[in-house]
Amino acid sequence: QVQLQESGPGLVKPSETLSLTCAVSGYSISSGYYWGWIRQPPGKGLEWIGSIYHSGSTYYNPSLKSRVTISVDTSKNQFSLKLSSVTAADTAVYYCARQGYGDYVGGVANWFDPWGQGTLVTVSS
Amino acid sequence: AIQMTQSPSSLSASVGDRVTITCRASQGIRNDLGWYQQKPGKAPKLLIYAASSLQSGVPSRFSGSGSGTDFTLTISSLQPEDFATYYCLQDYNYPITFGQGTRLEIK
């Protein structure tokens, strides 16, 4: 059973860098799949931040691209998120998830499953 | 980025009702659409992928349909545990984008 667990500081000061790690158990990141970060401001909807392949190939949301770095550490079976120059608008629950994929007639589907439980990061001085 | 628009934004229904939620994409996305259920304080849960494929373990009262720009999630007979917020997601291209959510409440 694949499980993901986010960890990192729950409080970050404005202008500093938010750093989170997602530890994966029950599956080796080296075996494949993309791994993603998604966030949700309090009371609002979901926003995809970015995804990384086990080889290190990344996709980022253009709205955050200048501030985001996602990396993978296969030796520790974990991947990480760094978001620089944070403001109060970055206050959110941050989720990590495995990005599965599969063929269907006419295309390739991607989905996020499973998810971590999420961790609330508050940006405040 | 592809915009995903869900309707309605909120919905009141009773146990046993048949409910339909709609998601419209700003451009054609083939069948590259998923549906997620989120309960308060919990992570989203995958229900449907590739527009109509039911995720393993998800009750058969959930179904998805559509292709191109218009998609629907149908719950055939609402159960108490189905009251939650539902999100669509397009994975046709990056950036992956979500709909704004539909809150399903008890009438």
Image (spheres, rainbow, N blue to C red):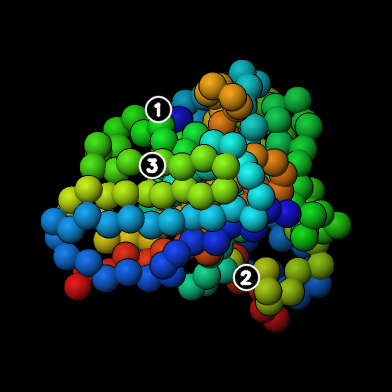
Residue type indicated by callout 2: Thr
SS under mark 1: loop
* Residue A7 visible in the current orientation: no
| Whole-percent x, y for residue A80 in the image | 69, 44
User: Is residue B26 shown to the viewer in this render?
Assistant: yes
Q: Are marks 3 and 1 in contact (CB under 8 Å)?
A: no
Q: What is the chain identity of the residue bearing mark 1?
A: A
For mark 3, give the secondary structure.
strand
Please tell me the numbered disc located at residue A49: none
At x 32% / y 69%, what residue is drawn? B11
Indicate the position of residue A34 as horizontal and vertical percent values. Answer: 64, 32
Alpha carbon separation for disc pair 3 and 2: 33 Å
**Residues at discs 3 and 2 in contact (Cβ within 8 Å):** no
Residue B41, position in %: x, y?
39, 62
The residue labelled by disc 2 is A91
Quarter of the image with the N terminus of chain B in it = bottom right
Q: Quadrant of residue B39?
A: bottom left
Instruction: For marks 3 and 2, give the one nearer the viewer.
Output: 3
